[in-house]
Each structure stands twice: as C-alpha cells, then as structure tokens.
Image (spheres, helix red, strand yellow):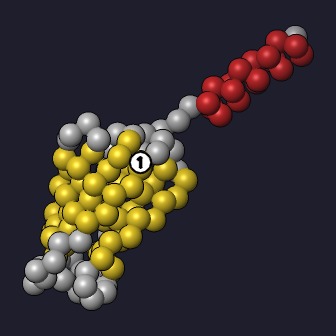
Amino acid sequence: MKNLLALLLLLVLTTVACSSKPPSIRVSNQRSTKANVQVKLENQNTININDVTGGATSSYQEITEGAVLVTAVIQSESVSPVISFNADRDKNHTVVVLNSTPPALRIDTDDK
C-alpha cells in the first residue's frame, strides 16, 4: 500500500512539474499619454493592445512561443519605438513603454 501511494505521489509530482503554460504578454505605459501597441507573433498573427492610458498596465494575454515584434504608437509622438524578443513558455512578458526622449520600449520577463 505504501509503495502504491509513493508511486501515485511521484506520478502527480512529475505531471505537475512537467506541465508548462503558454507565454503571456501585457503592456505597462510609463508615459503620461496613451499608447497603442501592436504585437506581431512568429506565426504571423497580430495582437493589438490599444488605449493603454498613461500610468496604466493592461491585463495579460496568452501568446504563442517564438519571435515577437512589438511596435508602439504613442499619442502626440512622431516616433514609434520597436523592440523584438523571444516569447518562452512559462513566462510573463511585460512591454514597458518608457517615459524617455525619444520614446523607447523595454521587455521585462518573469516566471509564471
């Protein structure tokens, strides 16, 4: 009986440890003006995260693994900053719209 319980526990732990979650992305706008962000994925799908007001952070959205190209269109700015990164499983990625001149982007990555 003890062997059966130990085997069952090992199976559950292995399943939990081996499961992985798709990457997620959100936008954090550090500027005082609104930002619209386009996220182009490696599979050619595009996600638009629009109307992120100054000082706000959007909710996470799941994306596919792989190369990601991000472009931000910022209210009252003629420059649209671009950044690329690789989206990995079990990671949360935050596109940070920096309050800088000229406008710039940064990617923060955390474990899920």
Indicate the quadrant where residue 99 lies: bottom left
Q: Residue at x 28, y 54 (%)?
A: 69
Relative to 75, residue 111 above or below: above
> In what quadrant of the picture does the N terminus appear?
top right
Report the residue that reaches farthest toward the right: 2
Rendering coords of residue 57 (x, y %): 32, 69
Which residue carries the number 1 mark?
A: 87
> For the residue carrying disc 1, how many other residues have a C-alpha within 10 Å: few (<14), some (14-19), or many (20+)?
many
Depth check: 28 or 67 in front?
Answer: 67
- Residue 78 lies, in percent from the top left, at 10, 80
Please indicate, yes or no, whether residue 62 appears anywhere in the rendered image. Answer: no
Q: Residue at x 45, y 54 (%)?
A: 92
- Answer left or right for 79 relative to 85: left
- Percent across and percent down for residue 20 are 53, 35
Q: Is residue 84 above or below residue 51?
A: above
Q: Which amino acid is tagged 1? A: Ala
At which x and y percent is residue 108? 45, 65
